[in-house]
Amino acid sequence: MVRRGLFSLALVFGAILPSLGGRVRLIDGVLGGVRRSKARRPELVSRSVNDTTEWKLRVTENSGVCETTPGVYQASGYVDIAANKSIFFWYFDARNNSKTTPLALWFNGGLGPCRINNDSASVSLNHFSWNTNANMLFIDQPIGTDWSHGTTDVGTSDEAAEDIWTFLQAFLSDIRFAHLQQRNLALWGQSYCGHYLPAFAAHFLDQNTAIGAGTIPGIPLNLKILGIGNGFTDPIIQYPAYMSYAGTNPYHPLVDPIWIDQSNYAWTKPGGCKEQAIACDNSNNDTICSKAQDFCDYFIYSALLGDYDPYYVLSENPDPYPADITDYMDSIQKTVGAEVQWGASDAVYDNFAATGDLMRSSRPKLEKAINAGVRTILYAGDADYIVNYQGVGALADALNTQFTEEYNQQEFSNFTVHGQVAGLYKNAGTFSYLRVYGAGHLVPAYKYGNLDYGEAALQMFDQIMSDQSLFST
């Protein structure tokens, strides 16, 4: 797939390198391409993971790793959702009022209780961690990424949603975590979570309805919050932003205009990226969608990278920040109960590339969640090219929800943090959009002005988690 941070990570560090080797993959000469030499994944007869007799939790409590705040409970380990499906998790109580605060799930890096130091071998406490005022559950998914292991059969966001639903049913059934069943639930993530989280939210809502109707057993999930950072959700809306951002962003052009002209032609020409993306969306066909991904990433995304780091265009490529955490992850593996070496399976990448899941729009599922009353925020660091703020802003403008008319009538306001301007925002009903100044792809990992690393992101998070619209301080 095309985005660093595509799949979940080791997850808990304030600034970390994402999985899939930490860089966009070069596949048959294409960054983010599709491996044509590999046989397509077989169609699966069944992916059932609902047999509760196979559910099991294996937990290491209070390992002392990462979260060193006195009295804060943590637990890490595995939820076995099937005979050969083990999903790794790392849970942290809130530092404040953990007995009453909501539960937030996070599927990427950049905000946890500790930050990797520049020596790549040690960490420091993160004073702006998102578990300051929320109970946080970090999840390595799909299986085959990072410390999760087992059968790597997930190849679409919808399939991933099934596994995460089952994971939560097992997790919340355990006596150690059952007290979280009635808490408000929030889904947060970035990058490919622009696909994942709408699929997760839509699936959770459907499952809750089925439980209410008595057609399936289970624990209803009290889904209240959806937060997506620099998320890739709708290719037809967001691909043009690669051309616009490469030529006109707040910092500097990324490539010579001739490359932008060529990518614009690749987008608009007959049989080009736009037509292929539309064909994928209309057909929902793996072959059509996979070919569309390969074409679009070669002629647009990959062609416009330039010499700057695509995750933080203020630095030349590669940006040395964040530090590589591979050695550190290996050093703590046994302590936190992980059973395999940290990393990502090629099989997971190939599964998603073979289905072309990236090219299928998740916008209808996002709209479904918003219209169901789930408070939702789209936020984006404006120094990120990979899923840039112009594309995320275009997505916000294009949404068709109960708040569309109100949103379109709003003007942007400065988002200030203790008087420091840190971005621009809009609110409409329970929907918000935030552009974060000076932040790269992992928004909570960056600082701006006189603010500290992650300080602006924590204010955003705390406000949304408190079921409030964004406001300045």
Image: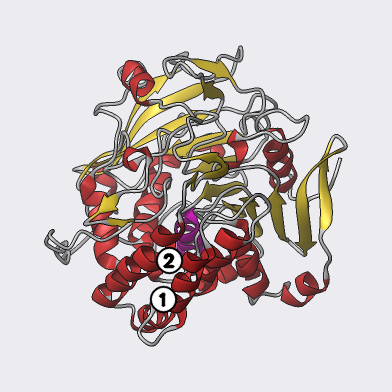
**Which residue position holds label 1?**
266
Residue 227, percent from left and from top: 60, 52
The part of the chain drawn in magenta is 193-211
Q: Main secondary structure of the magenta part?
A: helix
Could you tell me which secondary element the residue under label 2 belongs to?
Answer: helix
Residue 215, percent from left and from top: 40, 67
Q: Left or right of 314: which side holds 173? A: left
Q: Is residue 180 above or below residue 199?
A: above
**Which residue position holds label 2?**
300
Distance from label 1 to label 2 (Cα)?
7 Å
Mark 1 is surrounded, within 10 Å at the Cα level, by few (under 14), some (14 to 19) or many (20 or more) other residues, namely some
User: How many marks are shown on the rendered structure?
Assistant: 2
Q: Closest to the observer: 336 or 454?
A: 454
Q: Residue at x 78, y 29 (%)?
A: 450
Residue 158: quadrant of the picture: bottom left
Residue 350, percent from left and from top: 23, 55
Q: Left or right of 444: which side holds 360? A: left
Residue 22 located within the stretch drawn in magenta? no
Q: Is residue 331 above or below residue 20?
A: above
Q: Residue at x 40, y 71 (%)?
A: 360
Quadrant the N terminus occupies? bottom left
Q: Is residue 469 above or below residue 453?
A: below
Three-letter code, disc 2: Ile
Q: Are marks 1 and 2 in contact (CB under 8 Å)?
A: yes
